[in-house]
Amino acid sequence: MNLIPITSARFMGQELLAEMPDWSLIFGNSNPLVLEIGCGIGDFITEMATLNRDRNFIAIDYYNQGCLKTCKRIDAAGLDNVRVARVEACDFMLRCIQPQSLNEVIINCPDPWPKKRHRKRRLVNRGFIEFINGFMRPGADFYFATDFDDYGEDVARMMNVIENFENCLAPDLYRHELAGYPLSKYMKKFMAEGKKIYFVQYRKK
């Protein structure tokens, strides 16, 4: 399968990720670092980075087409505070993110694997949270959003019993609206179908 080359200056090919990147050098500043896992077509990260130009965003996705569309969006918006990489999340973090360096981790609408026999394949579980915890600064925020009620409730309950994270939405475990949080094309589509989005936000102690 031939992949469409991504020529954007904001795209980081494998040659740029062979060694641990110096993100402050790449962005030209030491602003807080945010990682979005699964950037899709880039509409969320484009709006988020536009609203928060004092933060540096790394948007990753496993699919070339998504990375291509994301680059086109951020290029059109003229955003210099976003970089895009086509990578698998855990491998990327181990190779390219320093421990305790992330100020935020964002995951929007990952594959819910709705069949019960497939739910062990879900990205966000306790093992994954314990893994990303090592890359997050104290005070860093974890955002999770899904339209799948079972997934949203499971993640919210799981996060609530992990000792070194505190619930930013207390007394609620989750909310269906989150002020200042952009809605992606997929979220809007789900909402137009009458579905609710489950927003979860926790902060590392």
Image (spheres, rainbow, N blue to C red):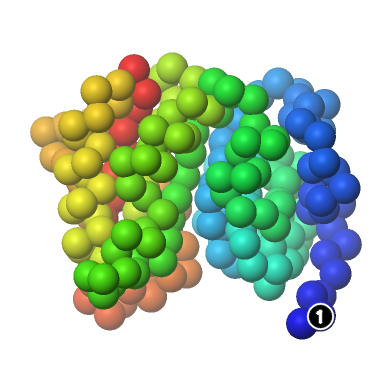
160 vs 128: above or below: above
* Residue 69 x %, y %: 69, 68
Question: Which residue is depicted at the point 34% across and 66% down?
Answer: 112
Residue 41 in which image quadrant = bottom right
Q: For the residue labelled by badge 1, is the local secondary structure a helix, a strand or a loop? A: loop
Residue 109 visible in the picture: no
Residue 8 visible in the picture: yes
Depth order, front residue of 95/160:
95
Residue 19 in which image quadrant = top right
Question: Which residue is depicted at the point 37% across and 59% down?
Answer: 122
For the C terminus, the image quarter is: top left
Kind of residue indicated by mark 1: Asn
Residue 163 lies left or right of residue 4; in this view the side is left
* Residue 105 x %, y %: 48, 39
163 vs 161: above or below: above
Question: Which residue is depicted at the point 43% across and 29% down?
Answer: 133
Question: Which residue is depicted at the point 70% across and 35% down?
Answer: 96
Residue 47 lies left or right of residue 163; in this view the side is right
Give the residue at mark 1: 2
* Residue 12 x %, y %: 80, 49
Depth order, front residue of 73/99:
99
